[in-house]
């Protein structure tokens, strides 16, 4: 995707990067809650612990974004979620709350796996010294992240083993839906996506967790 290519070359318009970081911070806030709901609904104690740790990880990443980028790039706080961010987080929270827990686990797996794949791709293809986005690039390249992603994949494989073919089909569908929404998330930052309302419609409802 052009967003990824320009992140690698360091030529990405800083407005697009700022848009991505601001929306990702909102995404992570909701993603952590979806993970915590899955933890609460898990049947195995080990899985409860793993999803609590994943939720903690999402909050830690969110804090790191805040501390590293909000100041450095002068990113505005308290902006509303973009349509794609709103759609993705609402989907994950719906799955976490209402779907069979194994299906909910499959719905969050692309969040881990795609960042591992994209992170590795970026790391291997980087060709620029003093890339302004280097700190972000390094976030998803380490061994620790590798272990976390492998654990998320293993949990889903184990969960799938206890499911019927119909349930496995639902897991696959949820996985693919989130893959599409990951794509949409990058694309929406590239497009600096806005709500298509006229200016007289109030788009920020002012409802935020923090
Ligand atoms: C849109 C979007 N999708 C996935 C991630 C990746 N991610 C965020 S926190 C975390 C680990 C949770 O313990 C992972 C894999 C992201 N940053 N933004």
Image (tube, rainbow, N blue to C red):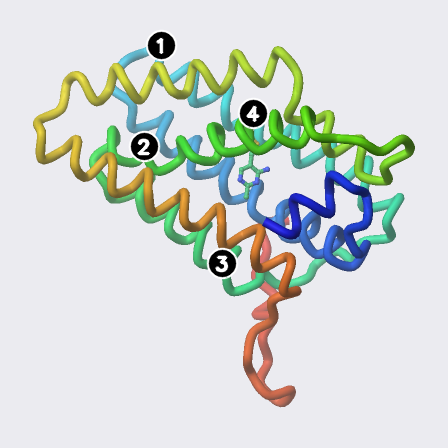
N-terminal of the pair, mark 3 or mark 2, is: 3
N-terminal of the pair, mark 2 or mark 1, is: 1
- Residue, disc 1: 46
Image mark count: 4
Separation of marks 1 and 3 at Cα, in angstroms: 31 Å
Find numbered disc 4 in the image and state the secondary structure of the residue it sits on: helix
Q: Position of residue 125 (x, y in %)?
A: 70, 30
N-terminal of the pair, mark 4 or mark 3, is: 4
Query: Is 39 located above or below residue 30 in the figure?
Result: above
N-terminal of the pair, mark 4 or mark 2, is: 4
Left or right side of 1 for 51: left
- Residue, disc 4: 56
Determine the residue positioned at 58% across, 25% down.
57
Separation of marks 4 and 3 at Cα, in angstroms: 21 Å
Determine the residue positioned at 38% across, 34% down.
37
- For ligand 1, tell me if the residue under mark 4 lies within 8 Å: yes
Q: Are marks 3 and 2 in contact (CB under 8 Å)?
A: no
Q: Are marks 4 and 2 in contact (CB under 8 Å)?
A: no
Q: Position of residue 16 (x, y in %)?
A: 73, 57
Between circles 3 and 2, the one closer to the viewer is: 2
Residue 106's disc is: 2
**Depth check: 203 or 107 in front?**
107
Determine the residue positioned at 57% across, 31% down.
58
Determine the residue positioned at 69% across, 26% down.
123
């Amino acid at each position: 995707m052009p967003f990824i290519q320009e992140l690698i070359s360091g030529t990405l318009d800083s407005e697009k990067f700022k848009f991505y970081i601001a929306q990702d911070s909102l995404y992570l806030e909701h993603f952590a809650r979806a993970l915590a709901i899955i933890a609460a609904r898990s049947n195995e104690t080990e899985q409860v612990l793993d999803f609590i740790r994943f939720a903690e990880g999402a909050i830690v990443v969110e804090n790191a974004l805040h501390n590293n980028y909000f100041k450095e790039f002068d990113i505005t706080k308290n902006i509303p979620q973009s349509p794609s961010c709103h759609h993705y987080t609402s989907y994950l929270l719906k799955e976490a709350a209402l779907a069979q827990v194994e299906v909910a686990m499959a719905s969050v797996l692309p969040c881990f796996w795609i960042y591992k794949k994209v992170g590795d791709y970026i790391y291997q293809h980087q060709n620029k010294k003093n890339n302004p986005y280097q700190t972000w690039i390094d976030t998803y390249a380490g061994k620790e992240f590798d272990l976390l992603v492998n654990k998320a994949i293993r949990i889903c494989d184990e969960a799938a083993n206890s499911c019927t073919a119909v349930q496995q089909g639902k897991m696959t569908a949820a996985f693919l839906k989130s893959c599409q929404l990951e794509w949409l998330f990058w694309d929406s930052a590239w497009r600096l996506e806005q709500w298509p309302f006229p200016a007289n419609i109030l788009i920020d409802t002012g409802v935020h967790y923090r």
